[in-house]
Amino acid sequence: MTTSAVTSYKRHRFPPQITAHAVWLYFRFPLSLRLVEEMLLERGVLVSNETIRRWAQTFGPDYARRLRR
């Protein structure tokens, strides 16, 4: 991966690992936003499904492109 392709998580409240995991779950498996929210809650991360939707819009195209490869 080149430096220009690195996803920037600056100015986000949650650590990049949590954001990446939520977006990965949403795009990798046929899960709804609410199911992803519940799965993160089981791990002790309280995040709304609206936040996950925004992450999917922001970071999703990059993850989807990498998953298709």
Image (cartoon, rainbow, N blue to C red):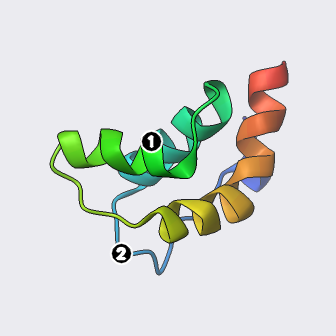
Q: Is 48 in front, or is 15? A: 48
Which numbered circle lies on residue 13? 2
Q: Nearer the viewer, residue 28 or 32?
A: 32
**SS for tag 1?**
helix
Which is more toward the observer, 4 or 41? Answer: 41
Q: Residue at x 34, y 65 (%)?
A: 14
Q: How many residues crowd mark 1 within 10 Å: few (<14), some (14–19), many (20+)? A: some
Q: Earlier in the sequence, mark 2 or mark 1?
A: 2
Query: Which label belongs to residue 35?
Result: 1
How far across and how far down the image is residue 44, in percent?
15, 49
Asked if residue 61 lies left or right of residue 41, the reply is right
Q: Is residue 50 left or right of residue 56?
A: left
Q: In this view, does 54 lie above or below 3?
A: below
Position in image of residue 66 (x %, y %): 77, 30
In this view, the mark in front (2 or 1): 1
Locate the C terminus by quadrant.
Answer: top right
- CA gap, disc 2 and disc 1: 21 Å
Give the amino acid at mark 2.
Arg
Residue most extreme to the left:
44
Q: From the top left corner, tell me how far across and down residue 5 is, in percent.
A: 76, 49
- Which residue is at a point 48% across and 62% down the rendered structure image? 49
SS for tag 2?
loop
**Crowding at label 2, few (<14), some or many (≥20) Cα neighbours within 10 Å?**
few
Q: Quadrant of residue 1?
A: top right
Q: What residue type is labelled 1?
A: Leu
Above/below status of 57 relative to 65: below
Question: What residue is shown at x 24% (from left), y 49% (from top)?
Answer: 41
